[in-house]
Image: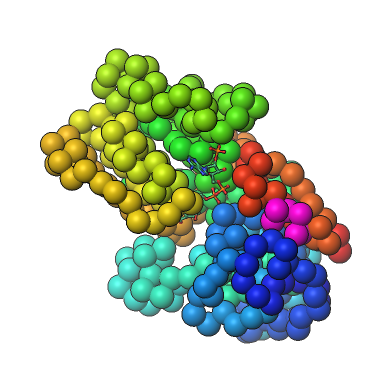
């Protein structure tokens, strides 16, 4: 089968199309013929390396997968050949103390399809039946591939961890990011007033169309001062922080007393500087969040399939042009999800 592989870690020029062995589904797995695969920032991290344990080169990433079932293992009961599906990219053991408590994304051996094992940037992938969810006919494969990883991440961070309530003020950094464009919609649905930052005038407009009440261009002036002004010096109740080193202190400074910061990423670096006095004096709460458990995934997908949350697609590339898709992601030009499409 064809796959979008890299033989060496590095920048997008390392991406190429190559033939790799087609996987065979185990007894509890289905073979999915991939129709579309969404890129995430983590595809760049995986490409740049270093490799996660157990992922020898050549490797192919891809965690957001939509396709059709091509074959089923003997023990698969809920799906059959021809079913349209999306894949939950979470990998977990199912038996550790956290899995037993229903907290799969806290699993002791937690992994992600496309990072821990080769992903959906290939014509086929074998996945456990428990990872599959039916994709309604009303959704295209591209829309299906724009959702699973980012919406579950944004949902757990905003709803389960930050516990956003109606009337609260929420700051979401990097409006154009996959997770953030999902989070803007989720925070709106939860009844919050949404502040967001982005990097250009056209992205400001798109963020407002998505439902942001205020969108501040981070390249024009000090957004932290602007948030202070817009909240009459109070600050926001919640910050969803995915940027890391470049914004960490400003995120803390943007919070009202008792505010909650949920950290979900580190696009600009994972080592941050922090004034602890600000944290204890303002009674701030710092919470971590990664992906979601199965219940949260089902909850957010229900809202997507009901049309209350919408996939945000930036662009669609044929898989032969996957390198250009990676280049667009690396340049930060996108608003929403970049999708790689397999015409098969
Ligand atoms: N914990 C988890 O489960 C989980 C899951 C998914 C992703 N993540 C992490 O979350 C982060 C975002 O992922 P993603 O896939 O949504 O990424 P993405 O689509 O690449 O978006 C990242 C966005 O961050 C913004 N940004 C970049 N540099 C910035 C800076 N210096 N200051 C402020 N904003 C900046 C940009 O938005 P603007 O141009 O609009 O400013 C960019 O579009 C990554 O670090 C990723 O590893 C974590
Ligand atoms: Zn586990």
Any part of residue 236 in sight: yes
Pinpoint residue 115: horizontal percent, then vertical percent: 55, 69
**Residue 184 drawn above or below residue 269:** above
**In the image: residue 195, left or right of residue 204:** left
**Residue 3 drawn above or below residue 178:** below
Q: Quadrant of residue 207?
A: top right
| Along the viewing direction, whichever of 80 and 282 lies nearer the viewer | 282
| Along the viewing direction, whichever of 146 and 60 lies nearer the viewer | 60
Q: Residue at x 40, y 49 (%)?
A: 244
**Residue 165 drawn above or below residue 66:** above
Q: Residue at x 65, y 27 (%)?
A: 202
Q: Residue at x 72, y 72 (%)?
A: 5
Q: Magenta stretch: dominant SS? A: helix
Quadrant where the N terminus is found in the figure: bottom right
Pinpoint residue 274: horizontal percent, then vertical percent: 25, 46
| Along the viewing direction, whichever of 158 and 236 lies nearer the viewer | 236
Pinpoint residue 24: horizontal percent, then vertical percent: 71, 83
Q: Where are the magenta residues, as a range? A: 322-327
Q: Residue at x 72, y 63 (%)?
A: 13
Pinpoint residue 173: horizontal percent, then vertical percent: 46, 37
């Amino acid at each position: 089968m064809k796959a979008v592989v890299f033989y060496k870690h590095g920048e997008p020029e390392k991406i190429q199309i190559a033939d790799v062995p087609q996987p065979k589904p185990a007894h509890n797995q289905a073979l999915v013929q991939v129709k579309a695969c969404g890129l995430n920032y983590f595809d760049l991290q995986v490409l740049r390396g270093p490799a996660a344990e157990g992922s020898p080169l050549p490797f192919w990433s891809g965690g957001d997968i939509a396709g059709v079932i091509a074959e089923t293992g003997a023990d698969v009961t809920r799906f059959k050949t021809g079913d349209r599906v999306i894949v939950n990219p979470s990998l977990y053991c199912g038996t550790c103390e956290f899995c037993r408590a229903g907290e799969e994304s806290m699993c002791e051996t937690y992994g992600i399809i496309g990072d821990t094992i080769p992903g959906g940037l290939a014509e086929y992938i074998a996945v456990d039946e428990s990872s599959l969810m039916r994709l309604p006919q009303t959704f295209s494969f591209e829309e299906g591939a724009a959702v699973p990883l980012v919406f579950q991440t944004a949902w757990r961070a905003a709803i389960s961890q930050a516990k956003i309530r109606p009337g609260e003020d929420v700051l979401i950094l990097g409006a154009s990011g996959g997770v953030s464009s999902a989070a803007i919609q989720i925070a709106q649905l939860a009844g919050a007033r949404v502040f967001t930052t982005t990097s250009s005038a056209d992205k400001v407009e798109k963020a407002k169309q998505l439902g942001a009440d205020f969108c501040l261009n981070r390249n024009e002036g000090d957004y932290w001062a602007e948030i202070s002004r817009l909240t009459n010096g109070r600050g926001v109740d919640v910050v969803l922080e995915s940027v890391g080193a470049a914004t960490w202190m400003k995120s803390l400074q943007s919070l009202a007393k008792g505010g909650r910061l949920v950290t979900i990423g580190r696009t600009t670096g994972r080592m941050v500087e922090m004034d602890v006095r600000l944290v204890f004096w303002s009674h701030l709460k710092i919470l971590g969040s990664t992906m979601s458990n199965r219940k949260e995934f089902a909850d957010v997908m229900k809202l997507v399939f009901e049309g209350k949350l919408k996939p945000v697609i930036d662009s669609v590339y044929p898989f032969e042009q996957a390198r250009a898709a990676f280049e667009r992601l690396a340049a930060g030009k996108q608003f929403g999800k970049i999708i790689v499409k397999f015409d098969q």
